[in-house]
Amino acid sequence: MLFDQVNRELELAQRHLEVLKVVIDRGPIGILKLAEETGMPTHKVRYSLRVLEQGQLIKPSSHGAIAGDAVETFLSEFEKDIDELISIAEVVKDIGKSF
């Protein structure tokens, strides 16, 4: 109940990251091939592509999605950003232990 929204957001972030990884590794790549490679339905892939494009992590090309202008910065800051989330989760865990 209390963590339902956090879980949904993390699952969504995981999906976006999976799509981004395939685009970086195999781009240019289209929606149908992305859906096949990730095992996700096309509507979910399409949504992830839209979110990633808004963040300039991918961009469209005539042959499919390719890595975007912000991907290098994103990847260089990824570990720091994940570590910050883990720190917050550890504080929440400690609070829970104090009950």
Image (tube, helix red, strand yellow):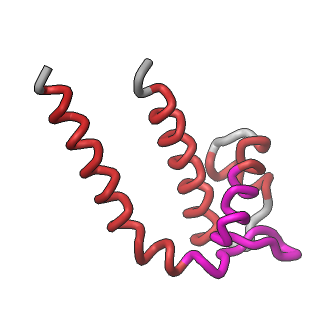
Seen from the viewer's position, the closer of residues 96 and 19 is: 96
Q: Position of residue 28 (x, y in %)?
A: 74, 73
Q: Is residue 42 above or below residue 19?
A: above
Residue pictured at 41% horizontal, 27% vertical: 3
Residue pictured at 46% horizontal, 35% vertical: 6
Q: Quadrant of the C terminus?
A: top left
Q: Position of residue 21 (x, y in %)?
A: 55, 63
Seen from the viewer's position, the closer of residues 59 and 7 is: 7
Residue pictured at 68% horizontal, 70% vertical: 58
In the displayed structure image, the side of residue 12 where residue 29 appears, left or right? right
The image quarter containing residue 24 is: bottom right
Q: Position of residue 54 (x, y in %)?
A: 72, 64
Q: Is residue 54 above or below residue 41?
A: below
Total label count? 0
Task: Identify the magenta region.
Answer: 48-71
In the displayed structure image, the side of residue 87 where residue 11 appears, left or right? right
The image quarter containing residue 23 is: bottom right
Residue pictured at 15% horizontal, 35% vertical: 94
